[in-house]
């Protein structure tokens, strides 16, 4: 079976990957960065086929724009590869050493995860991006992109594989699953014998489908029903600036704020300032009774609103008696991505940081900072919202695991 | 539905757990250690019911022995709880801090995983053990034990819950699923909304079933088809001692050696010494042609032998041309648990450490050391054989994850 052969080759390549030096990996990344631009016309021609099909299908103009590759966008992909080449290599780092009384010397050493599967949707630049990050971190990647971008993805993968070959590196460090039907995707998710980790990138629906159907361990990413809590002592001006930024700076991103939680004593003071600023940005406020009574800029919220990641000009508003009730509300409705408190009260800030169960918890800052680049990781494959392995922004280190290397001189167990 | 209510209570308890201090947790562990012994008669009476049922069912004497609780074994459980109380608390450890140019101060802080489900088989001491480790690491545990030990497990859980209550800690820090049918187990594995991680402990069959049916992220443990490679320069006496230890010191454990890999130049020199010593311990050697020709103590191996974790007085033997072939053979057949090389050649030792894809890789030592106590972790919930989250022995730290706590003074994203 074609898919199984592809996965088998990827598994074989993962053992090859362990032999390449940092210099070899960086050389290959730079070579491919050059080749992407040099083969730009070919890639754009392939992309034109995808755009043609998109038009026939009646794809929205916004989605067509996400799909479109231009010389400038290919330049951007190429630049991305160069940036990853410049990052430190995580592989081989000695995380810990310890000597045992029996003379055994243990070293905990950072190693690659192995074969990483990535299932993603229409943007073809993910192809180059995901390759760069998985390759630099010593992994093999199997990509399953959306059917909308298949010609673009094939063209980009072809360039990457030719670059690897020119550098004497196994081409199987990257594989693209060319069949785009759903059955293949389902079959791919069963390939536990060959694939070590699966990372879905895309809509909530895609991620749910992977979580529910995969036999391969999954890193869940992306869903962000992020809250900002306005505490009793919040500074109104700061609250306004942070919330407007977190809600409106970019609507369709997972770290945007989707819900306000407000201390009942701030509902008549801070909240009207925030509400006015949000209305000026055309945000609809869906509020509970207390907030509705305090500010006539709102409409009534339903229970469903509190659990919704809008990704739109909408925000829910919930009033609470104190920080404990705020934390309980957030832990009930959040997707454990990013939440913030705005307060001048140190005790409440600390309580919020400790008790809110999310990957990233902020005091007096915008949730929009949950991002690999903003955290200084230099790159990002996604934002993990699960508890296992990694939480929050995932850079190169988060694409690795460890092994124990133990040296002895004949020790046996007594 | 009863199971869902139990899971919901566990999820509510996980937020309580974050509020207890180290002293509170240790006091509770010591109180429970005392209560287990104080209520020993009640526990032994419950265990007697299980043993009665076991006899009716015709359970083997060996399995009945695993199931049996005595005053001494209850003392042992109690001692285990005291040991865990004495270990450092992993929660709250600051793993890393970094300041960003915009003034944001980030701290990566160790936190509990949340609600941990453990599915296990007949030994009732796992009930107390698993509670101690998950509780000390700030987690809530939901236990699904085997039907054979249900009365024992209920009695132990009752004592633990009463101890928690006496110490002012939520009893829901531990829950036991009392229904023992398979449908309940299957339903439990779907409880992704409430349970953060599932750890199966038991036979290969149990673990496979959990991996295949769980919607909850799983930490796979326990399967160990462990190899020892006798390199060209191996010292015969050292090889003999290590291999006899790794194969025969305890047969039924996951870190026992199940397969020998031998350099063709050692097959006439070192191997006969090893084979003789193994035969003296009544181990059957199942060898490929080259080893069979070199030593008349062997029988012929089939292909299947190389993939088998015997847990018995059996070992497979494979001859190879060099260390590269040894590594390829091991990476093909191993379960990525523990492997060792016996060599005097530093270059081969380093190559083996780097290229063998297992959680624990040894030079000149027995694979039997893969164990939380032997590694100095002071405790162990199991040995992870997967790539995600943790590899090898899992102690208290491996039952945790992290979150980012970020302090700002009004930062917004530009």
Image: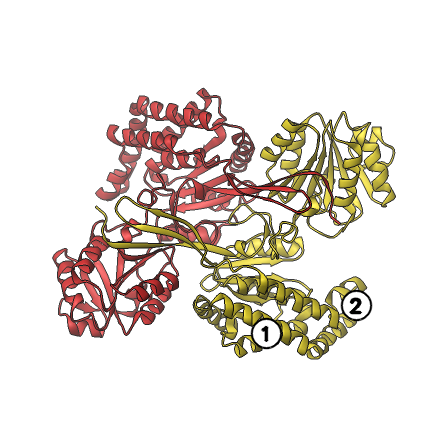
Chain colours: A yellow, B red
**Residue name at image x 57 percent, y 76 percent:** A163
Would you place residue A326 above or below residue B216 in this image?
A: above
Mark 1 neighbour density, 10 Å: few (under 14) some (14–19) many (20 or more): many
Secondary-structure class at tag 1: helix
Secondary-structure class at tag 2: loop
Label 1 chain ID: A
Q: Nearer the viewer, residue B297 or B124?
A: B297
Would you place residue B25 above or below residue B183 in this image?
A: above
What residue sits right under mark 1 in the picture?
A31
Mark 2 neighbour density, 10 Å: few (under 14) some (14–19) many (20 or more): few
Residue A367: image location, x then y, percent:
69, 44
**Residue name at image x 47 percent, y 54 percent:** A401
Which label is found at residue A58?
A: 2
Label 2 chain ID: A
The image quadrant that residue A77 belongs to is bottom right
Residue A166: image location, x then y, percent:
54, 79
Q: Nearer the viewer, residue B356 or B118?
A: B356
Would you place residue B374 above or below residue B305 in this image?
A: above
Q: Earlier along the polypeptide chain: callout 1 or callout 2?
A: 1
Residue A10: image location, x then y, percent:
49, 69
Can residue A112 be seen at all in this image of the molecule?
Answer: yes
Can residue A328 be seen at all in this image of the molecule?
Answer: no
């Amino acid at each position: 079976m074609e898919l199984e052969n592809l996965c088998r080759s990827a598994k074989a390549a993962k053992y090859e990957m362990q032999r390449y030096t940092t210099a070899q990996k960086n050389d290959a990344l730079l070579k491919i960065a050059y080749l992407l631009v040099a083969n730009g016309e070919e890639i754009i021609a392939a992309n034109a086929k995808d755009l043609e099909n998109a038009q026939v299908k009646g794809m929205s103009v916004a989605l067509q724009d996400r799909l479109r590759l231009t010389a400038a966008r290919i330049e951007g992909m190429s630049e991305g590869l160069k940036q990853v080449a410049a990052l430190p290599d995580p592989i081989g780092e000695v995380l810990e050493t310890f000597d045992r009384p029996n003379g055994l010397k243990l070293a905990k050493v950072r190693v690659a995860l192995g074969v990483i599967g990535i299932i993603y949707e229409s943007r073809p630049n993910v192809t180059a991006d995901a390759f760069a990050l998985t390759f630099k971190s010593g992994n093999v990647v199997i990509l399953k992109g959306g059917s909308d971008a298949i010609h673009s993805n094939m063209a980009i993968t072809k360039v990457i594989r030719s670059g690897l070959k020119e550098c004497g590196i196994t081409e199987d460090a990257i594989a693209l699953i060319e069949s785009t039907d759903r059955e293949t995707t389902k079959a791919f998710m069963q390939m536990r014998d060959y694939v070590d980790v699966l990372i879905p990138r895309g809509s909530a629906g895609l991620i749910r489908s992977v979580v529910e159907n995969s036999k391969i361990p999954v890193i869940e990413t992306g869903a962000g029903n992020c809250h900002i809590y306005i505490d009793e002592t919040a500074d109104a001006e700061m609250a306004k600036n942070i919330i407007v930024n977190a809600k409106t700076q970019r609507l369709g991103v997972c770290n945007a704020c989707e819900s306000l939680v407000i201390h009942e004593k701030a509902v008549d003071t801070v909240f009207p300032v925030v509400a006015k600023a949000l209305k000026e940005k055309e945000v609809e406020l869906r509020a509970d009774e207390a907030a509705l009574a305090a500010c006539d800029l709102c409409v009534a919220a339903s229970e469903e609103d509190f659990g919704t990641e809008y990704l739109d000009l909408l925000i829910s508003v919930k009033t609470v008696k104190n920080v404990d009730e705020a934390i309980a509300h957030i832990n009930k409705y959040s997707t454990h991505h990013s939440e913030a408190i705005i307060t001048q009260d140190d005790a409440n800030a600390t309580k919020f940081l400790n008790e809110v169960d999310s990957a990233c918890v902020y005091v007096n800052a915008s949730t929009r900072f949950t991002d690999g680049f903003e955290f200084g990781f230099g790159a990002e494959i996604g934002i993990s919202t699960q508890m296992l392995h990694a939480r929050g922004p995932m850079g190169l280190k988060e694409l690795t695991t460890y092994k124990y290397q133990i040296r002895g001189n004949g020790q046996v167990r007594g």
